[in-house]
């Protein structure tokens, strides 16, 4: 891990066949026990990061509710600043620190609209968001650890660019299937196994019918 950026933890709950959502976007895979575990992790990091599509589909709060602890800063990647002001994240931005990461192509009217809702805007790229640039800027905001709870495409970008320091995956007792269902990692993928990211298994935890795998 470079000293110039925060430590990145990628977290997800997946089905036995590696899906993080059904073809219709249903991602309710985790049990109550796993939600408690995840929220304990959230309480120990400085920021939670997701993409705009996750906000659009799931409309999450990204706060700590099933455990005690502080709410981390919420970071949403939204290159054109199009996140809905009706989303739970924007509606609660006055109470929970919220950063919207945009590109230089984001329309001024969209930025002004978000700034009126107490969000902080960070420009991290010309036409798209540069993840390495963003992480460097987050480090300057005194954010030392980032929990990525994104979709398959965002996960791929972090993995492709070698920005994942830890991976925590909960294997849930569901078989989802479907060629259009979202997998843990989407994108074009690596062409060769030799080029893929190889991690070391640090810990295995059984919780009911679920198994939590912790890699570094």
Image (spheres, grey):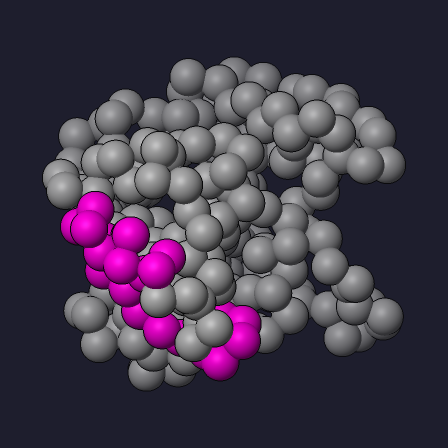
Relative depth, front residue between 5 and 86: 86
Q: In this view, does 21 lie above or below 81?
A: above
Residue 33 seen in this snapshot: yes
Between 11 and 108, which is closer to the camera in this rendering? 108
Tell whether 133 sits left or right of 88. right
Above or below 195: residue 71: above
Q: In this view, does 140 lie above or below 115?
A: below
Residue 145 falls left or right of residue 29: left
Question: Which residue is rendered at x = 54% and y = 45% of the image?
Answer: 53
- Membership of 193 in magenta stretch: no
Location of residue 78 in the rendering, given as x and y in whole percent from the top left corner: 46, 57
Rendering coords of residue 74 (x, y %): 30, 49
Q: Quadrant of the rendered structure where residue 47 is?
A: bottom left
Residue 169 occupies which quadrant of the picture?
top right
Q: Position of residue 183 (x, y in %)?
A: 71, 42
Q: Does the magenta stretch include residue 118?
A: yes
- Which residue is at a point 64% across and 70% down the rendered structure image? 160
Is residue 118 or residue 169 the one in the foreground? 118
Residue at 77% x, 63% y: name it.
189
Count of all numbered marks drawn on residues in the image = 0
Quarter of the picture containing the N terminus is bottom left
Give coordinates of residue 10: x percent, y percent: 49, 53
Is 140 located above or below residue 53 in the figure?
below
Q: Can residue 61 be seen in this view?
A: no
Where are the magenta residues, as a range?
A: 109-130
In percent of the image, x 42 and y 47: which residue is there?
Answer: 83
């Amino acid at each position: 891990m470079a000293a110039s950026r925060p430590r990145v933890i990628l977290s997800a709950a997946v089905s036995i066949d590696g899906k993080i959502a059904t073809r219709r976007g249903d991602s309710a895979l985790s049990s109550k026990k796993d939600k408690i575990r995840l929220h304990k992790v959230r309480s120990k990091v400085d920021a939670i990061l997701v993409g705009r599509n996750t906000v659009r589909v799931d409309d999450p709060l990204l706060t700590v509710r099933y455990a005690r602890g502080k709410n981390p800063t919420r970071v949403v990647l939204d290159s054109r600043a199009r996140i809905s002001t009706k989303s739970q994240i924007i509606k609660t931005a006055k109470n929970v620190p919220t950063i919207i990461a945009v590109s230089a192509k984001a329309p001024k009217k969209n930025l002004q609209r978000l700034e009126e809702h107490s969000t902080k805007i960070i420009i991290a790229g010309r036409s798209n968001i540069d993840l390495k640039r963003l992480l460097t800027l987050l480090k300057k905001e005194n954010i030392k650890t980032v929990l990525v709870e994104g979709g398959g495409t965002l996960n791929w970008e972090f993995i492709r660019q070698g920005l994942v320091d830890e991976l925590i995956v909960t294997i849930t007792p569901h078989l989802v299937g479907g060629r259009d269902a979202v997998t843990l990692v989407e994108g074009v993928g690596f062409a060769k196994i030799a080029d893929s990211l190889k991690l070391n298994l640090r810990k295995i935890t059984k919780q009911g019918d679920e198994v939590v795998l912790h890699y570094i």
